Amino acid sequence: MLGDYAGVGILLAIALTVPIGGYLIAFLLRPKRPYALKKQTYECGLETAGDTWVQFKIQYYIFALVFVVFDIETVFIYPWAVAYQQVGLFALAEMIVFIGILFMGLAYAWRKGALEWI
């Protein structure tokens, strides 16, 4: 039975050896000439102008979370839609409750202004 997993073990060994070997070769062949200018903070290759620590608005994160919630909703609804004939009326009621909960979350986020881009 252990012989059945030999292919998986070989694949795992190759999958670990190739990237680690690439990093090791790059580490050994890279130029090693550090100086003070290399250690300075930069923006797109240019010297920084102003404060280098910029905080983003929390609305960007909330907008991303709302997107993820509805993306996950799609992951749950798609298999249900595919197997709708087999699951019956109870699953329809469950999906209506699920979509209702998500709609209430969307209404709450909309009311709080989380979907406003400005």
Image: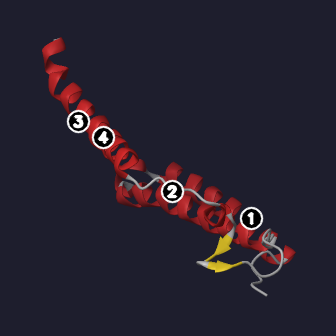
At 42% from the left and 56% from the top, the residue drawn is 31
First reached walking from the N terminus: tag 3 or tag 4: 3
* Image quarter of the N terminus: top left
Q: Quadrant of the C terminus?
A: bottom right
Q: CA distance from mark 3 to mark 1?
A: 46 Å
Identify the residue under disc 1: 105
Question: What is the C-alpha distance between the residues marked 1 and 2?
Answer: 55 Å
Question: Front-most of 83 and 16?
Answer: 16
Three-letter amino acid code at the position of disc 1: Gly
Q: Is 28 on the left-hand or right-hand side of 75? A: left
Marks 3 and 4, Cα distance to the nearest angstrom? 10 Å
Q: Earlier in the sequence, mark 3 or mark 2?
A: 3
**34 or 78: nearer the eye?**
34
Residue at x 27% of width, y 32% of height: 12
| Residue at the spot of label 2 | 33
Amino acid at dot 3:
Ile
Tell me if mark 3 has few (under 14), some (14-19) or many (20+) residues whose alpha carbon lies within 10 angstroms of its own.
few
* CA distance for labels 3 and 2: 33 Å
Distance from Cα at disc 2 to Cα at disc 4: 23 Å
Q: Amino acid at mark 2?
A: Arg
Residue 100 position within the rendered picture, expressed as x and y whole percent measured from the top left = 68, 63
Instruction: Estimate the x, y position of residue 6 in percent, counting from the top left.
Output: 16, 22
- Of tags 1 and 4, the one toward the viewer is 4
Disc 4 on helix, strand or loop?
helix
Disc 1 vs disc 2: Cβ atoms closer than 8 Å? no
111 displayed left or right of 6: right
Secondary structure of the residue carrying numbered label 3 = helix
80 or 91: nearer the viewer: 80
Q: Which mark is residue 14?
A: 3
Q: Nearer the viewer, mark 2 or mark 4?
A: 2
Q: Position of residue 56 (x, y in %)?
A: 78, 72
